[in-house]
């Protein structure tokens, strides 16, 4: 059994239908689906990039139909307003239809929609208690929602299951990091505390200091020239926040859920700013967000070669 977080259609457009029909659903662009049907991943990503999507996100999109079509007996979670909803996918086949669509860009008038049957959606745990969003611990809110269309719950899936079962959550809430996050968020309510903004500030500050240090050294050994191509720290901070949004808060190399300062449960999963080509500068097009341990592992390795090795690890059966 797997646990997934889902956004249902563009801006959750399909949620009312999914709630009524007891389904999970997926939008597919008519310009991209032919490539998926041919299992042409490279062609799919190439076209998606022309539509304004970064390669990493397009690669995840390519995998979504298989997840939706193949899910059975998995838990699916969705937030709508004040409540957290959940369901369990059925083994019944999915249906895909071509339907009219008013694309805001005006570039397409039709879209494919896939519906997969699930058990009736519920906003109560298995003991009958309402699952209110405001009552969920602030740390848990970060891994129980996603900017992505679909995201597997890799961080604390046992917590998500306990929440749905109505079991005690004390073993998590009593941990020092969780308690610190609760206190910082104002007894559970996330208001003016923004972990992404705080992380962006820290990463931008570190990058600014790094370039100043690397380019100001008068030493005999060779240092890489790490030029800062952003005019100010605030400009870099905004770019980092844009990257987080583009990457849907996922690691650019592993697709693991990134964690942010103040609500992290594992410091190795904290968001880290990485230069794609280590010989390049801090500039647009050469930056990506990865998990802290990935940045440490990658070091100054070739980006494509490092991705290849990570893929070998992911497909080896050892993970």
Image (cartoon, rainbow, N blue to C red):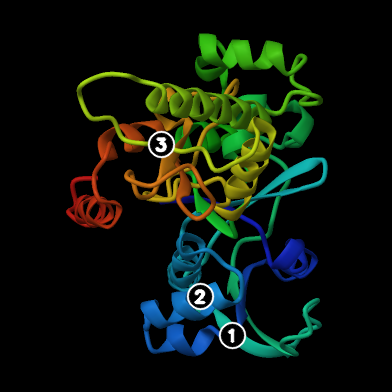
Label 1 vs label 2, nearer the camera? 1
Above or below, comparing residue 185 to residue 318 in the picture: above
Quadrant occupied by the C terminus: top left
- Residue assigned mark 3: 226
Question: Within the image, what quadrant is residue 99 found in?
Answer: bottom right
Residue in the image at 81% along x and 76% along y: 104
From the viewer's perspective, is the residue at label 3 or at label 1 nearer? 3
Identify the residue shown where x is 46% and y is 63%. Answer: 60
In 3D space, how far apart are the residues under numbered discs 1 and 2 (Cα atoms)? 13 Å
Whole-percent x, y for residue 202 in the image: 57, 24
Which residue corresponds to mark 1?
Answer: 96
Percent across and percent down for residue 228 are 51, 38
Please say if 178 is above or below 116: above
- Could you say which quadrant of the image residue 188 lies in? top right
SS type, badge 1: strand
What number is the disc on residue 19? none
């Amino acid at each position: 059994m797997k646990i997934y977080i889902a956004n249902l259609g563009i801006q959750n457009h399909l949620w009312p239908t999914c709630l009524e029909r007891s389904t999970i659903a997926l939008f597919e662009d008519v310009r991209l689906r032919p490539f998926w049907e041919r299992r042409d991943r490279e062609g799919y990503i190439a076209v998606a990039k022309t539509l304004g999507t970064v390669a990493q996100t397009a690669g995840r999109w390519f995998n979504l139909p298989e997840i939706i079509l193949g899910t059975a007996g998995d838990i699916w979670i969705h937030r709508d307003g004040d409540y957290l909803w959940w369901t369990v996918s059925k083994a019944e086949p999915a249906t895909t239809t071509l339907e009219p669509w008013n694309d805001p860009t005006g570039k397409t008038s039709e879209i494919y929609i896939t519906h997969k049957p699930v058990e009736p959606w519920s906003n109560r745990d298995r003991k009958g208690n309402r699952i209110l969003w405001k009552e969920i611990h602030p740390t848990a809110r970060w891994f129980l929602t996603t900017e992505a269309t679909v995201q597997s719950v890799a961080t604390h899936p046992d917590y998500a299951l306990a929440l749905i079962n109505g079991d005690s959550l004390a073993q998590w809430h009593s941990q020092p990091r969780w308690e610190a996050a609760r206190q910082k968020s104002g007894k559970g309510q996330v208001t003016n505390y923004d972990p992404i903004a705080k992380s962006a500030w820290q990463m931008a500050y570190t990058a600014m200091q790094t370039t100043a240090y690397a380019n100001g050294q008068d030493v005999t050994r060779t240092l890489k020239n790490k030029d800062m191509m952003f005019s100010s720290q605030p400009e870099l901070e905004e770019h980092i926040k844009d990257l987080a949004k583009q990457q849907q808060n996922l690691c650019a190399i592993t697709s693991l859920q990134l964690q942010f300062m103040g609500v992290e449960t594992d410091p190795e999963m904290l968001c880290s700013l990485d230069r794609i080509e280590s010989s390049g500068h801090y500039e647009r097009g050469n930056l990506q967000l990865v998990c802290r341990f990935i940045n440490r592992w990658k070091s100054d390795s070739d980006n494509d070669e490092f991705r290849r090795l990570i893929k070998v690890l992911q497909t080896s059966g050892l993970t």
